[in-house]
Image (cartoon, rainbow, N blue to C red):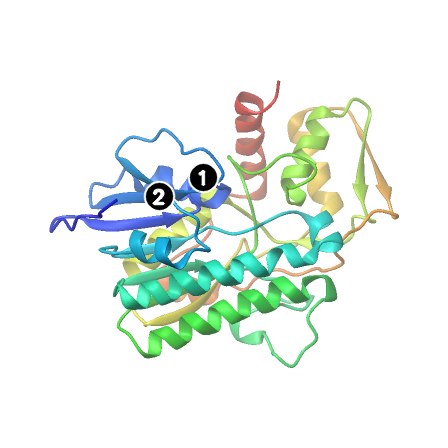
Amino acid sequence: MVIIIMKNKKNILICGATGFIGRNILLDLCKNKKYRVFATYHKSKKINVPKVKWLKADLTKINIVKKITKNIDILIQAAATTSGAKDIVSKPYIHVTDNAIMNSFLLRSAFENKIKHFIFFSCTVMYQSSKLGIKEGDFNPLEKIYPKYYGVANTKLYIEKMCEFFSKISKTKFTCIRHSNIYGQFDKFDLEKSHFFGASINKIMRAKKEIVIWGDGQEKRDLLYINDLVAFVKRCINKQKKNFRIYNCGYGKAYKVKEIISKIIILSKKKITIKTDLSKPSIKTSLFLNCKLAERELDWKPKFSLEDGIEKTLKWYKTNFQK
C-alpha cells in the first residue's frame, strides 16, 4: 500500500494497533481531524475503526518495515512481545529476540524515510527497588538489574540508546516513555498472558469465595490508567521540544499488591477473601516514578485516581469480557 502525503494532515503510523496500548491510542487519535491514521496488525485481526487505514505487517521483515514507513510523519511504536510474571520468570527469552529485531528495523527505516517523530514505549524494569520516587537520571547502568528482568531490561535500554544515536545523526525527534504498570480497557485479562492487574481482575470477577495471589502481596506497584498514558503521548507529540527525551510516565505512588487486590474486591462489591501462595512465582520489586520532568516540559499530570481507574476497568470488563 502506498501512503499518500496530504498537506493539511499529518500521517501517523501506529505499530501494534491491535494490542492494549496501541488500540487505546488508535481509538483516540482517529478522532483528530489533523491526522491521517495508519495502523499495523499481524497475527491479530484488524479492528473495525472508521477512517483508519490498516496495514498487515510482520515487523521483523526489513522490506515490509521500509515500505510501511514511507511518507509517515509520526511513528508510534506500540508493537511488542509482552506477557505477565509467569512468562517473565519461566521463559524470559521471549521478550528479547523479536523486540530487538523489529525495533532495530523500525529505527533504521525511520531514519532512511526521514520520519519527523518516533515514539517508543520503554518500561521501568531497569530501575532498582526504591522507597523514593525514581527519576529518569537515577538509573545507573553499573547497578545490578533484577535477575528476572535482565533480558527485557537490556533490550529496552539498547532500543533507547539506538533512539539517542539516531537523534544525533538525523532531524527526527525521539521519545522514549518509561511507563509504569498500565491498566484499563482492552487489556489482557487471561491468566496465562496478562499482567498483574488484568489477571487480578479476572480472578476476582470469577471467584466465588476466595482469591489466591502469587507471593506474599507486599511488593509495591505504580499503576497508571490507560487514558492517562494516551494523554501523555499526545503531549509528547505537541509539546516535546528536544530532539531526544526519556520520560517517566506513572501515577507517582506505590501501592502494595495486596492493597490493590483489596480495592478491586471492594469496588467489585464481591465478598471474597484473599489467600497467598508463596510457592508461585512473583517479582519482588517495589518502586514508583517521579514524573516531574514530564510535568515541567509537557505540562502533564495523571488525572485518574486508582479508584477511578479500577471502577472504569471493572465496568468495561463486565460489559465486554465477562460472560
Horizontal and vertical percent position of residue 101: 49, 61
Q: Which mark is residue 238?
A: none
Horizontal and vertical percent position of residue 19: 49, 42
Task: Estimate how packed mark 2 is, as few (under 14), some (14 to 19) or many (20 or more) residues with alpha carbons within 10 Å.
Answer: many
- Which quadrant does the C terminus fall into? top right
Q: Which residue is mark 2?
A: 39
Residue 6 seen anywhere in this rendered image of the structure: yes
Residue 240 seen anywhere in this rendered image of the structure: no
Q: Observer-nearest residue: 150 or 66? A: 66
**Mark 2 and mark 1: span between their CA atoms?**
8 Å
- Which quadrant does the N terminus fall into? top left
The residue at the point 71 percent across, 54 percent down is: 91
Q: Which residue is mark 1?
A: 18
304 with respect to 111 (left or right): right
Earlier along the polypeptide chain: callout 2 or callout 1? 1
Q: Which type of secondary structure does the marked residue at label 1 adopt?
A: loop
Task: Estimate how packed mark 1 is, as few (under 14), some (14 to 19) or many (20 or more) residues with alpha carbons within 10 Å.
Answer: many
Q: Amino acid at mark 2?
A: Ala
Horizontal and vertical percent position of residue 221: 66, 53
- How many numbered circles are shown? 2
Horizontal and vertical percent position of residue 77: 41, 54
Q: Amino acid at mark 1?
A: Thr
192 with respect to 108 (left or right): right
* View extreme (bottom): residue: 142
The residue at the point 45 percent across, 49 percent down is: 229
* View extreme (left): residue: 7
Q: Which type of secondary structure does the marked residue at label 2 adopt?
A: strand
Q: Is residue 118 above or below residue 206?
A: below
The residue at the point 28 percent across, 43 percent down is: 37
State yes or no: discs 2 and 1 in contact (Cβ < 8 Å): yes
The residue at the point 30 percent across, 54 percent down is: 67
